[in-house]
């Protein structure tokens, strides 16, 4: 029976109950010599459903008289039960009025994050068996994705959603979170091995790149002044990310802020060969990481391939030597060349028209910005007639602005006592413009193992690591600025 019919029966039963109660009350007032009780009686039938009757039982003298008031057999069981409760004097109210929603704790985003973490098997990566520390780590990971904040704020924000309740860590405090970070650091090696086993194999492509973030504090021994890629004049901490060919993170290493990028390569080679047990991999790194010195180190391992790129001066030398002919790009944007300066290597030259246009536009903007600042200095020199500027004073002013945009090589300067003149070096500009949009990728891999197109495609996969750094820094995880006091907590 549908809800509409059931509700109709319940309404009829309530009306009957009220009517009968009124009759009984009237009879009780008129004749106090008997007591009447209404009840529901179920009479079993052998081959058919039982009969449900509404009856009245009253006492007349020494006799008990039963009177059938209604047959409720056709009513649905919920209606009969409601009638039975009403006869007992229990007040019935609609279920909508039984509860009042005072507060709704957000849960949907928590369920989405925890569901994806479960699908990826993050819990098994952290620890094979369930434990308190694993639940706290899962909570910190989920909170970092949902709303990045400090450890103290994490324990407070947990109670504004269902996250802590879902993981059973409602009573966690900030100190427990820091202790759990120490527990997690001790398991880092095992976690990275599990990830390597899942995503890497012999002959796989491995991407590696570095970045850095500024440090706010005074106690961490890793914080040093170095190449802060955040652009802030603060101590920084360097960290490297090792990923598979699809950009999925495998391992993270943390270095002191004054560590040069190339010095991190031997650690990665050791990790791939010893810790992960990989005999044959292809390491991909940009030209700032895989320098000539580091490539000499990699050549000591015959089974270790690599892919990198040439710097602009090296590309210019290839052009001047005639090894790189710009006419190669009249019909195609990719060509493979050889050079005596790079024996046992393959050089894949690429031309990107969009990149060429972008570099041309950027160079013109930087030249114009530098010219505007130099023009102000020239005007000041011309204006100072009573107290003319010396050549040293003019040189100090010019030095502060000439290479701010890295275009000093494109200007010819004349600095004398009370005289300053500048102009563009068009020959230098044209020499650089000829190589706009051209980049050269170098690799130790044989053509039979990796085609020229695949070589370019593999090198461009480093963009996946750069995207991971953007997520870590600003978009999703927001690890910067780093504020932890302890070195282990930073790691």
Image (cartoon, rainbow, N blue to C red):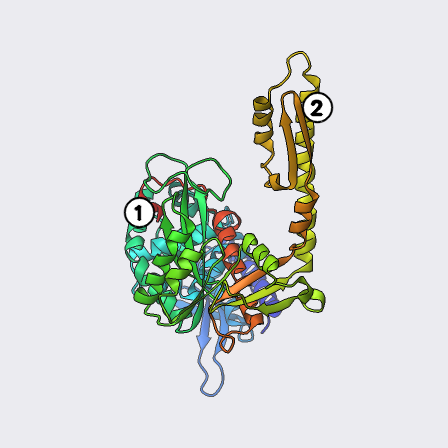
Residue 118 shows up from this direction: yes
Q: Measured from the top left, where is residue 46 in percent x and y?
A: 44, 87
Mark in front: 2 vs 1: 2
Circle number at residue 479 = none
Ranked by sequence position, the earlier of labels 2 and 1 is: 2
Find residue 277 and report its image quarter: bottom left
Q: Nearer the viewer, residue 97 or 84?
A: 97
- In the displayed structure image, the side of residue 156 where residue 318 appears, left or right: right
Task: Tell me if residue 469 comes above or below residue 74 in the rendering.
Answer: above
Residue 163 shows up from this direction: no
Q: Measured from the top left, where is residue 18 in percent x and y?
A: 55, 58
Q: Measured from the top left, where is residue 441 in percent x and y?
A: 54, 63
Q: Residue furthest front?
A: 321
Q: Residue furthest bottom?
A: 47
Residue under label 2, please give it.
379
Q: Nearer the viewer, residue 339 or 133?
A: 339
Q: Secondary structure at mark 1?
A: helix
Residue under label 1, please give it.
488
């Amino acid at each position: 029976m549908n809800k509409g019919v059931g509700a109709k029966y319940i309404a009829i039963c309530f009306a009957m109950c009220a009517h009968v109660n009124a009759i009984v009350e009237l009879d009780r007032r008129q004749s106090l010599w008997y007591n009447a009780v209404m009840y529901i009686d179920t009479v079993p039938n052998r081959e058919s459903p039982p009969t449900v009757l509404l009856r009245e039982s009253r006492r007349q003298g020494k006799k008990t008289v039963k009177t059938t008031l209604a047959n409720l057999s056709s009513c649905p069981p919920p209606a009969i039960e409601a009638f039975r409760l009403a006869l007992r004097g229990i007040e019935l109210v609609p279920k909508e009025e039984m509860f009042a929603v005072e507060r709704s704790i957000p849960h949907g985003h928590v369920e989405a994050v925890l569901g994806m973490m479960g699908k990826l098997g993050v819990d098994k990566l952290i620890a094979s068996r369930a434990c308190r520390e694993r639940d706290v780590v899962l909570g910190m990971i989920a909170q970092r994705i949902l709303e990045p904040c400090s450890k103290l704020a994490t324990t407070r924000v947990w109670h504004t959603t269902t996250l802590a309740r879902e993981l059973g860590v409602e009573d966690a405090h900030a100190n427990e979170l820091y202790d759990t970070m120490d527990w997690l650091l001790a398991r880092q090696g095992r976690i990275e091995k599990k990830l390597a086993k899942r995503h890497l194999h012999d002959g796989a492509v491995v991407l590696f790149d570095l970045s850095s973030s500024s440090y706010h504090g005074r106690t961490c021994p890793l914080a040093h002044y170095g190449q802060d890629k955040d652009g802030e004049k603060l101590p920084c901490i360097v960290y490297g990310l090792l990923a598979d060919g699809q950009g999925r993170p495998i391992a993270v290493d943390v270095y002191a802020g004054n560590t040069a990028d190339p010095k991190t390569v031997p650690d990665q080679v050791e990790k791939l060969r010893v810790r992960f047990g990989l005999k044959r991999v292809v390491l991909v790194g940009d030209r700032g990481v895989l320098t000539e010195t580091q490539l000499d180190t990699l050549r000591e391992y015959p089974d270790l391939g690599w892919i990198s790129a040439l710097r602009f001066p090296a590309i210019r030398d290839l052009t001047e030597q005639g090894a790189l002919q710009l006419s190669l790009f009249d019909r195609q944007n990719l060509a493979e060349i050889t050079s005596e300066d790079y024996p046992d290597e393959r050089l894949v030259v690429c031309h990107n028209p969009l990149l060429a246009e972008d570099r041309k536009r950027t160079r013109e903007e930087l030249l114009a910005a530098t010219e505007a600042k130099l023009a102000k200095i020239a005007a000041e020199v011309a204006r100072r007639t009573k107290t003319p500027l010396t050549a040293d004073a003019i040189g100090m002013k010019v030095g502060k602005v000439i290479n701010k945009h890295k275009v000093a090589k494109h200007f010819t300067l004349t600095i004398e006592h009370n005289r300053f003149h500048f102009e563009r070096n068009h020959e230098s500009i044209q020499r650089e413009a000829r190589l706009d949009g051209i980049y050269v990728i170098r690799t130790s891999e044989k053509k039979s193992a990796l085609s020229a197109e695949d070589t370019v495609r593999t090198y461009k996969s480093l963009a996946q690591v750069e995207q991971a750094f953007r997520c870590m820094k600003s978009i999703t995880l927001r690890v910067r600025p780093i504020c932890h006091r302890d070195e282990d907590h930073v790691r």
